[in-house]
Amino acid sequence: MRSIRAILKYGLLLPVCQVVGTAWHELIGHGLVGAAFGGRIVWIKLLGFRVWPHFYWDGWEGYGAIDLAGITSRTGERLMELGGSASTWLVSVAAIGLLWLRRWRRPGRVHRPGRGWPRVILILLGLWWIDLFTYTLPTWGLRRSILWGGTKSEPYEAAIALGVPGWLFQAFVVVSSIALATAWVVGIVRDRSKSALQISNNSSKSENAGAGSSEATGSEPRA
């Protein structure tokens, strides 16, 4: 029953994570980097809606898009284009690192897998490496979502324009994606194993304490 609840919880939160990740990709990854090079945001589009400067339905053309004007250099433009997927990749690295650095539990309570919103949020953010990976799929002749999605690899083209060899960028994406996916899975499994061991140890201590208490309160034999 607990596993079903966990599946339902993460199933409901994944679409929210998708929306938040798209907004982060556009606003922080593209928008903030572009602004650092003198750019200004003309409009922002998320999931078919224009959300800036006016909110209205503009038709589905992908998960998100942003238009910036006034970037002062070609290097700034390329870094802005690379910034979208790079920003979500960095969030994933940070989230998985935090999952490994400590166990997210409520003070004074036995830790159980999947409990506690900080841990849930970090697990979801740890999946954001997928953004850079799927954006690189078009370089192998696939669409972003394999069967649908765009055919342009924005970060790949930006990296090449910045002087990075295409094969090296592809290798980095593949290796880092495998490493992050492995660290994400192992981190979750390790946490569950430690939690099960802790619960087992606490149960044993409680049983031993109960047995000791029964012996201490037993009646003295009559002479």
Image: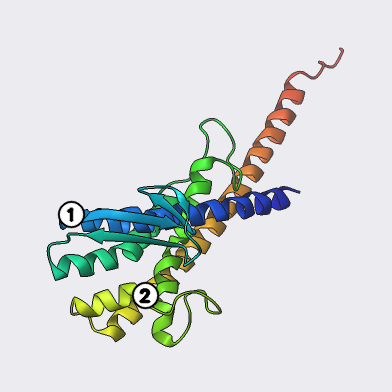
Callout 1 amino acid: Ala
Q: Residue furthest right?
A: 222
- Judging from the image, what secondary structure is the residue with disc 2 in? helix
Can you say which quadrant of the picture contains the C terminus?
top right
Percent position (x, y) of residue 151?
A: 43, 80
Crowd tier of the residue under label 2, counting other residues whose Cα lies within 10 Å: few below 14, some 14–19, many 20 or above: many
**Figure disc tally:** 2
Percent position (x, y) of residue 175?
A: 38, 76
Callout 2 amino acid: Val
Query: Which is more toward the observer, 159 or 57?
Result: 57
Which residue is painted at 16% across and 58% down in the image? 37
- Judging by the rendered image, the residue that carries numbered circle 1 is 36
The reply to whether residue 9 is in sight is yes
On residue 117, the disc is none
- Judging by the rendered image, the residue that carries numbered circle 2 is 173
Image position of 134 (left or right of 67): right
Which residue is painted at 28% across and 67% down in the image? 81
Q: Please tell me in which quadrant of the rendered image residue 116 appears.
A: top right
* Disc 1 versus disc 2: nearer the observer: 1
Q: Please tell me in which quadrant of the rendered image residue 21 appears.
A: bottom left
Q: Residue furthest left?
A: 72
Task: First in sequence, mark 1 or 2: give its number.
Answer: 1
Percent position (x, y) of residue 24?
A: 38, 54
Query: Which is more toward the observer, 110 or 66?
Result: 66
